[in-house]
Image: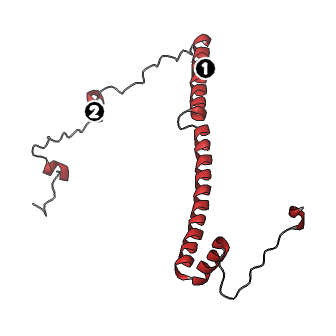
């Protein structure tokens, strides 16, 4: 039946129970059989709220806004707390940088004490007062302290 043209449409062929087609020859009968056109319903006019109610609503909204702003500034995660935490973080980061620099210097001192005999000798001369054989020691005293 593919090549044969019929009055059926594709949708009607696929439906299990196709509705019978109504052929109307007279346009007046279509008008009488059709449902009446839909009319817009009259909408009740919106009554504006009373001035007291509007003022009360404005006060409530202002109060809620003030509470939210105060909470945003002073609350647990508010602006003031965030600024304090940032200052504290900056202070801790600065002290950490100083400690890392001191650690690097101490590591360098350890390496020199383990590997460099000249460093060990200079510390022994300064702290213990040791001398090499054949060296002379001169002790200089201030004249002001002796009087």
Q: Please name the residue that numbered disc 2 is placed on.
A: 30
Q: Please name the residue that numbered disc 1 is placed on.
A: 58
Along the viewing direction, whichever of 19 and 77 lies nearer the viewer: 77
- Mark 2 Cα shell of 10 Å, populated few (<14), some (14-19), many (≥20): few
Q: How many marks?
A: 2
User: What residue do we see at 62% from left, 76% from top?
Assistant: 124
Quarter of the rendering containing residue 29: top left
Whether residue 9 appears in this view of the structure is no
Q: Earlier in the sequence, mark 1 or mark 2?
A: 2
- Mark 1 Cα shell of 10 Å, populated few (<14), some (14-19), many (≥20): few
Q: Nearer the viewer, mark 1 or mark 2?
A: 1
Q: Residue 69, image x and y in percent?
A: 60, 31
User: What residue do we see at 60% from left, 20% from top?
Assistant: 58
Asked if 128 appears above or below 51 in the picture, the reply is below
Q: Residue furthest front?
A: 147
Along the viewing direction, whichever of 57 and 50 lies nearer the viewer: 57
Q: CA distance from mark 1 to mark 2?
A: 58 Å
Quarter of the rendering containing residue 55: top right
């Amino acid at each position: 039946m593919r090549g044969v043209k019929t009055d059926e449409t594709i949708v009607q062929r696929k439906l299990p129970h196709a509705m019978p087609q109504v052929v109307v020859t007279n346009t007046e009968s279509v008008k009488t059989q059709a449902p009446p056109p839909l009319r817009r319903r009259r909408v009740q006019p919106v009554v504006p709220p009373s001035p007291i109610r509007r003022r009360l609503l404005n006060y409530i909204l202002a109060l809620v806004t003030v509470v939210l702003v105060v909470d945003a500034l002073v609350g647990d995660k508010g602006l003031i707390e965030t600024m304090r935490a940032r200052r504290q973080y900056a202070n801790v980061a600065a002290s950490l940088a100083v400690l890392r620099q001191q650690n690097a210097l101490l590591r360098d001192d350890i390496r020199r004490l383990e590997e460099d005999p000249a460093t060990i000798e200079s510390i022994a001369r300064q702290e213990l007062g040791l001398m090499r054989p054949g060296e002379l020691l001169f002790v200089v005293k201030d004249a002001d302290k002796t009087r």
